[in-house]
Amino acid sequence: MGKDVLEAQTIFKPLRVSQSDMMQKVPLTDVSIGDKIKVEKEGREYTGILMPTHRFSGDRIITLKLDNGYNIGLKVTDEERVVLLEKGGDIERKSVDLPSINEDLPKISILATGGTIASYVDYRTGAVHPAQTEDDMIYSNPELAQRCFPSVEVLFSKLSEDIEPNEWILIADSIIKEFQAGAEGVVVAHGTDTMGYTSAALSFLLDDLPGPVVLVGSQRSSDRPSSDANLNLLAAVEVAKSDISGVYVVMHENLDDNRCSIHMGTKVRKMHTSRRDSFKSVNKEPVGWVDPEERIVKVEGVPCRNKKEPKRIGCINGDVSMIYVHPGMDEGLLLNGSEGVVLVGTGLGHVPTRVISTVKELIDEGVPVVVTSQCLHGTVNCNVYSSGRMLAEVGVIPGKDMLPETALVKLMWALTLDDKVEDIMETNVAGEFSERRW
């Protein structure tokens, strides 16, 4: 399935060509990526360009780019009829003149980790390919060369759900190297599903950043008419050039293609599965916005660019579990051998009272337990109801208004430091919780 010429005889049944299709009859082994084909399946016809299949595609699955610009995956069995309509010719990427690079522009490093934003489109077939070089990134986003002196490095190419905690260390160390090499800002191209975890991790791991680190992704693939990839990337570059420092996430502010919000790395969450404005700041307003067309960046209340030497503090202990509290939960879930536990409690940060004895058992054994809230908005308060007071008495650490995923990452980080975990969790390190109560 990864070959340019599909092993068609193992996917398609022999053509049964009608009189109207006689002019298109070809051997099945000649069906190649880029060909226009028609698939008749369950009484419906699908016509489009045969696309490359991804490494994670299932058996006997093909991908078609329809005339409306969208892709569709079809499982082709012996029951389906496939007809070649038009040969596509050479699959090689269309040759285009890349814009010249102006080394006098701000030097911005782009670190690619995967996701649809770190890709380029073959403009003949519409196929999306992972960006592997600086040319690939500029090929898909030629305006980059007008805005900065880009340096692109592909750290790895993964679906964001496959990124592991140890890879946050790789990203953090790579960011430090880029600043040491003269970058004025660093953009991290990342899949959207776990971008909030990575942004939180970088917020804790990186200290004395001389400029901005900007995580960016796209909700819609670069080959779709509604893609947000180009606007988000250009907006991220503008923020990376700005006079701020720290870790941020930049994504669409609304459903229009006009500007993007700038979120603190510890206060942002993906709130919708597919909308372009999915990313929202929680328990805090975005720190600003960026209009990539006008090249305007507006921020307030954030650190300024400086001449400090960036460094990494601590590491990541991935042996921490996050448990979503629910009616009927088995307290045995807590006894899984983890070195730290984040409880995503109900309301003000509650758990069933019958579970509290097990929580005490963990804490007595030296396992820190942090409690956050499923409500997201608002803060944990263990002093209102009896179950909360009981949790406080056994020694849980209130997560205040931290997002559960931010609390998880912070605990993973705190466990690697020399200071007492409880003290670290109760210290506002990277703006992860609000000082006020409500």
Image (cartoon, grey):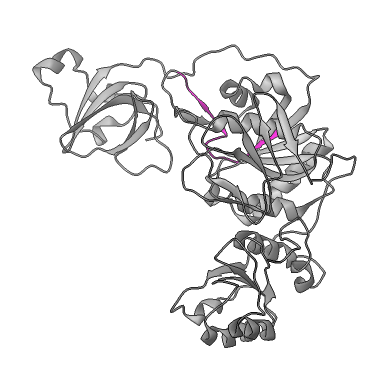
Question: Which quadrant holds residue 200?
Answer: bottom right
In-front residue for pair 334/404:
404
Q: Quadrant of residue 362?
A: bottom right
Tell me if 138 is positioned left or right of 203 in this view: left
Q: Quadrant of the N terminus?
A: top left
* Closer to the camera in the image, 390 or 415: 390
In the displayed structure, 290 sits above or below 328; it is above
Residue 420 appears anywhere in the view:
yes
State which region is magenta.
109-123
Residue name at image x 63 percent, y 86 percent:
390
Residue 365 pos. (x, y %): 67, 84
Image quadrant in which the C terminus is located: bottom right
Q: Is residue 112 magenta?
A: yes
Does the image show residue 365?
A: no
Where is residue 270? Give x, y as percent.
55, 49
Q: Is residue 264 left or right of residue 41?
A: right
For the point 21% across and 40% down, which residue is it?
Answer: 77
- Judged from this view, the residue extending furthest toward the right is 307
Residue at 69% over, 74% down: 397
